[in-house]
């Protein structure tokens, strides 16, 4: 992604995931806002952007952070706003992955996977994507395997993120184990 598009993507993430009020935005229950309202909010914050720029960032994002549906846009995951974003419950893939620092992994294996500063804990169907995310926390992340099938059967709710990201309010430690990578 070009440097300008990376800057636009970061501003979009901040506006749609963390600080909508700072951009004059009010998120819908699903976390969406009208595309033109987002563009106006970003411009008001000093970001040079137009609707075509936003559409390009959505399409070219390898992490699929955003969804554009009709004239509305939303972040698909990663929210830290106080108002919980409503997500559709799903039956997860049988095995999900999460990678993090050795220190955080020790806490997860003891206490379970928690959302921390986000609304949901993030898991992925893609082992390599988990390791990529984990490398942001540590040069040598610990790869955690989540028995999502058993957790779901026990009543743990999983919700949609996108095709490679699955979200949960929490996953108890009993369903999580460290694996070599």
Image (tube, rainbow, N blue to C red):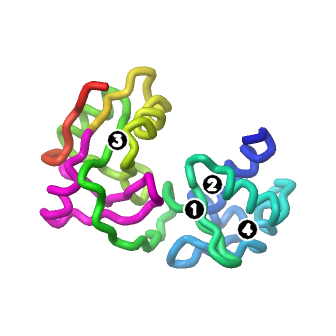
In the image, what residue occupies the spot 63% across and 54% down? 13
Label for residue 98? 3
Task: Give the mark nearer the N terminus: 2 vs 4.
Answer: 2
Along the horizontal axis of the image, is 91 left or right of 28? left
Q: Are marks 1 and 2 in contact (CB under 8 Å)?
A: yes
* Magenta region: 145-172
**The one of 5 and 117 positioned closer to us in this rendering:** 5
In the image, what residue occupies the spot 32% across and 29% down? 142
Along the horizontal axis of the image, is 75 left or right of 114? right
Along the horizontal axis of the image, is 45 left or right of 10? right
Q: Are marks 1 and 4 in contact (CB under 8 Å)?
A: no
Q: For numbered disc 2, what is the local secondary structure?
A: helix
Q: Is residue 29 above or below residue 7?
A: below
Residue 44 in sight in this render: no
Q: CA distance from mark 2 to mark 3?
A: 21 Å
Packing grade of label 2 (10 A; few <14, some 14-19, many >=20) is many
Task: Give the mark nearer the N terminus: 1 vs 2.
Answer: 2
Is residue 95 on the magenta stretch?
Answer: no
Label 1, on which residue? 75
Image coords of residue 168 (percent x, y)? 32, 59
């Amino acid at each position: 992604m070009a440097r300008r598009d990376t800057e636009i993507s970061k501003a979009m993430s901040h506006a749609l995931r963390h600080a909508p009020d700072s951009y004059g935005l009010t998120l819908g229950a699903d976390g969406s806002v009208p595309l033109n309202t987002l563009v106006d909010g970003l411009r008001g914050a000093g970001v040079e952007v137009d609707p075509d720029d936003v559409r390009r960032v959505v399409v070219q994002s390898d992490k699929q952070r955003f969804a554009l549906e009709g004239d509305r846009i939303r972040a698909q995951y990663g929210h830290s706003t106080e108002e919980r974003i409503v997500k559709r419950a799903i039956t997860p893939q049988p095995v999900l992955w999460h990678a993090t620092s050795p220190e955080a992994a020790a806490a997860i294996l003891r206490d379970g996977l928690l959302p921390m500063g986000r609304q949901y804990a993030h898991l992925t169907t893609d082992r390599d994507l988990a390791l990529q995310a984990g490398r942001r926390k540590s040069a040598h992340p610990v790869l955690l395997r989540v028995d999502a099938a058993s957790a779901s059967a026990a009543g743990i709710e999983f919700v949609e993120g996108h095709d490679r990201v699955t979200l949960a309010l929490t996953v108890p430690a009993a369903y999580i184990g460290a694996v070599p990578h």
